[in-house]
Image (spheres, rainbow, N blue to C red):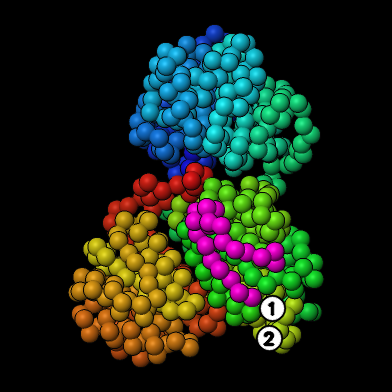
Amino acid sequence: MCGIVGFTGRREASPILLEGLRRLEYRGYDSAGLVTGTGNELHLRKKAGRLAELAKHLGMHPAPGCHGISHTRWATHGGATDRNSHPHLNERNDIALVHNGVIENFAALKHQLQSAGVRFRSDTDTEVLAHLISHYYHGDLATAVRQALALVKGTYGIAVIAKAEPGLIVGARLGSPLVVGVGEDGTYLASDANALAGFADKVVYLADRQICTLTETDWEIRDQDLAPVSVSVADIGNFLGNGDAEKGDFPHYMLKEIYEQPESLANAMRGRLANDDATAHFGGLNLSAQQLRQIDRVVMTACGTSYHAAMVGEYLFEELARVPVEVEYASEFRYRNPPMDRSTVVLALTQSGETADTLAALRESKRMGHTTLAICNAVASSIAREADGGVYLYAGPEIGVASTKAFTSQVCVLTMIALYLGRTRHLSSAQGQKIIDDLQAIPDAVRKALECHDHVNRVAAKYADARNVLYLGRQYLYPVALEGSLKLKEISYIHAEGYPAAEMKHGPIALVDENTPSVFLVPRGNVFDKVMSNMQEIKARGGPVIAIASAGDREVSAVADDVIPIPDVPEYLQPIVTAIPLQLLAYEIALLCGCDVDKPRNLAKSVTVE
Ligand code: F6R
């Protein structure tokens, strides 16, 4: 979603700002802009569309100066136009601001400002902040920012500059991340440390309600009353993913990340599986064995793909650990008030660690006194820092907007936590050891599953014209059916639905005709025969069937129109292996439809607004 980069130092700002924004492009945006300062002038440049548009504009109208702030915007209030792009200026054009988040009371504030004669130039919620800060500005930007923010309800990460204070950037955060970077050439501000890689050596994360001031050679972080606070400064390397953030030889990040899965799964397990006591160990869970035993219910909360991983987690925890689980969309859970007793643990799953709904659900659970845990990929993200304990995925940066390797790593980590919980309960050491052996074989199984790519290409070519696709699976593979359908719709814009295979008789089967293919998840397992019957029901109604099935399964190939083979693994690990062909299928169909796979329309990688 929106991104912020600021710089003040001894180099031209605009190339640094552009490069920083480029590194945040993957988060999703629809316009971009920057403003630089040269003593007596602010130079504003902004454009709807991709960063290339802004770069082109800057080619013709350079923005000079060694001090500036910049932004990629994902529209919330007002369309994606030049006018609505950030930065926004006050009426006198001497204060400029960029903003991530949402000002919830902007309508009331705007009304008050307009009644006082202020003229607005955009439809955004953000612009009220520029005018409010301007109202309080009497030569001290930090004080004006503080006074303006006191009136605001909502979330913000902001960066502000004033013409009269050359070299100064003021930042502030509430619910939207901001990080100060310190480098040889100057001082930086960003919404994500990834924007500062190669520029800054040290970083400092702001906490909510903190305000920072940056100059060419110095920085300071203060509380909301502008009193200095002590902070910890860390090496930037600690906060960047351990994977390569470039595409390498792959045409898209998504494909690279699909192919990284044998490695990302091995990373998730590295050092965590112990043969000695046939269990898993985690550095950051922060729970004693006694506390672990006392957990008698887990509520898992997440959004999107992470929600689907949580649904797999429900099956895993209940089967392997006999711990009851409920899975809740974070966006719903945060506003519900379900009865939960003290021993219920809330587990948030999130790749980015910044999803606004998941963060709010975690905070609400903490407020209610529950132990909160997180399974997270982005190191030092808001959720990773705020949960009582957690487990990192160590999957490396996931840049493709469609989540792939994070899903399989989440399922892998959930399996390890289920093993850990199970071993404090009924699982014998022999059963624990069997799970460890199964898990250790998974990277190779995924490597084998990736060999289905040629089959996937053939299937994609045959069905790329479909306008509706059904994804059907049962038990552990029902959430994978949901995930497969989400992958297809988000990157190819083809309508797809995931269902428990037997449930389609209760309505969705009405959609079946010769133009509506059904993707069946049907590897060998307990419900194999049942799923085969569901497949026959679709065939009987003329619907084409694509089966993801155990390699060489003749029974399946006798019924299905097309078969994509995958290796056999134990049932509880099938979600990991069956996800691979579904990711590849969505990718190949999207390419055939001419879609921009890594930057699908309307989507953002990290959804930092409600
Ligand atoms: C789907 C996708 C989204 C995210 C969702 C949650 O491919 O990427 O559905 O899974 O926005 O994001 P995180 O896991 O970062 O909380």
Residue at 58% over, 15% down: 136
Q: Which mark is residue 431?
A: 2
- The answer, for residue 21, to whether it is visible in the render is no
Residue assigned mark 1: 422
In this orientation, which residue lies closer to the viewer: 492 or 505?
Answer: 505
Q: Which amino acid lies under the numbered mark 2 shown in the image of this protein?
A: Gln
Residue at the extreme top of the image, as rendered? 40
Indicate the position of residue 53 as horizontal and vertical percent values.
Answer: 38, 31
Q: Residue at left 34%, top 66%? A: 497
Q: Is residue 529 visible?
A: yes
Which of the two residues, 489 or 599, is positioned nearer the viewer here?
A: 489
On the image, the x and y values in percent for residue 491 come to 37, 56
Residue 300 lies left or right of residue 60; in this view the side is right
Q: Which residues are magenta?
A: 323-343
Image-based side of 84 in relation to 259, left or right:
left
Snapshot quadrant of residue 117: top left
